[in-house]
Image: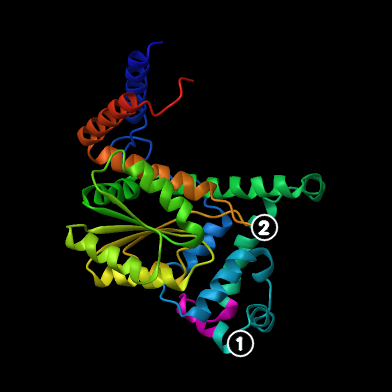
Amino acid sequence: MPSGQQARASQASQQARAQASAITPGGPGKPGERPSAAEPAPADKVRALFGGHRLSPGQRRIAQYITDHLTEAAFLSITDLAERVGVSQPSVTRFASSVGFSGYPALREALQPIALSAVANVPGAREEDRRNELQAAVDAEIGNLESLRRAFTDTDRVLEIGRELARSVPLTILGLRISVSLAEYFAYAAQRIHPDVRLVSRGGSVAYDALLQSREAGGTWVLAFAMPRHSKEMLAAMRAARRAGLRVALITDSGLGPLAGEADVTLTAGTGSRLVFDSYAAPGILSAALLQAMADADPERTQLRLEKYEQAAEQHDFFLDD
């Protein structure tokens, strides 16, 4: 196929793909009717118990330990739980009160049915024995994707955030250390559909300067990526963004950490932690969904920018003729 025809075909294909993948507001069912959510995963139920409460750093450690070790932690005595987490027994009691329970026994009573449901859904020991570590890592990521799928039952929140990010000119994307790869992916793709995307991948005063310049240029939002281990420089950068007058949308692995407390909006997606280094299947899908929401927010701008990019790609011969 001649190069001009191939570029036009590629352009038409990308436009058709953008239109076909536009996000439908809300969930399935009649217009205006809220979708019936699928049964939440046990970890999601635990996060729901703890979410919405202002927790101290020590209390966040307790919450994270219970979430990560649910089937064991739900049956521990207060002494054993305090020892496992490395806090005092009164700290565990105060934690239970902080999340709305009369004490630790009441919290444990609420956790145990969730833990039993988790055990009931675990494959049998023989099946577990047949899996190697690579398969177990894939299974863990499938679990993260299933949790994200449930969160997508109602698409309105992602659509709303996408609209806000699309309106912010310039739009700053912040990612430091291990999170740089996700931030670079998002910024690279967002530049195709947004007129002014600025990537910040260094912390300290460099990040502060970039955030301040973004706000002075008229920007209103920062999209931050924060995967574990969460760094102090990311927390400092988010605080600097807010001091500069920018709002912060955060994509991270947990809504319980101190970073979530500094964000205006938090979207969570679990990371795979079965191998030496974490994997990011769910955060990658969440990022792509948010890009789609930005494209949907201004379809005319999206189409125009995609057309211009294809013209540039043809003119400068960017790609191989596969």
**Where does the magenta region start and end?**
93-105
- Direction from residue 269 to residue 308 in the image, left or right: left
Instruction: Quickly name the residue at label 1.
Output: 89
Q: Residues within 10 Å of mark 1 (few under 14, many from 20)?
A: some
Q: Position of residue 166 (x, y in %)?
A: 25, 47
Badge 2 element: loop
Is residue 2 visible from the viewing direction of this image? yes
Of labels 2 and 1, the one closer to you: 2
- Direction from residue 236 to residue 194 in the image, left or right: left
Do callouts 2 and 1 mark residues in contact (Cβ within 8 Å)?
Answer: no
Seen at 77% across and 49% down, the residue is: 128
Q: Report if residue 102 lies within the magenta region.
A: yes
Q: What is the image's colouring?
A: rainbow
Q: Position of residue 12 (x, y in %)?
A: 32, 21
Q: Main secondary structure of the magenta part?
A: helix
- The one of 17 and 9 positioned closer to us in this rendering: 9
Q: Position of residue 29 (x, y in %)?
A: 36, 35
- Direction from residue 40 to residue 294 in the image, left or right: left
The amino acid sitting under disc 2 is Val
Q: Report if residue 167 lies within the magenta region.
A: no
> Which quarter of the rendering shows the N terminus?
top left
- Direction from residue 284 to residue 218 in the image, left or right: left
Badge 1 element: helix
Q: For residue 234, what is the image quadrant?
A: bottom left
Q: Residues within 10 Å of mark 2 (few under 14, many from 20)?
A: few
The amino acid sitting under disc 1 is Gln
* Labelled disc at residue 276: 2
Q: Is residue 271 above or below residue 236?
A: above
Q: Position of residue 96 (x, y in %)?
A: 52, 79
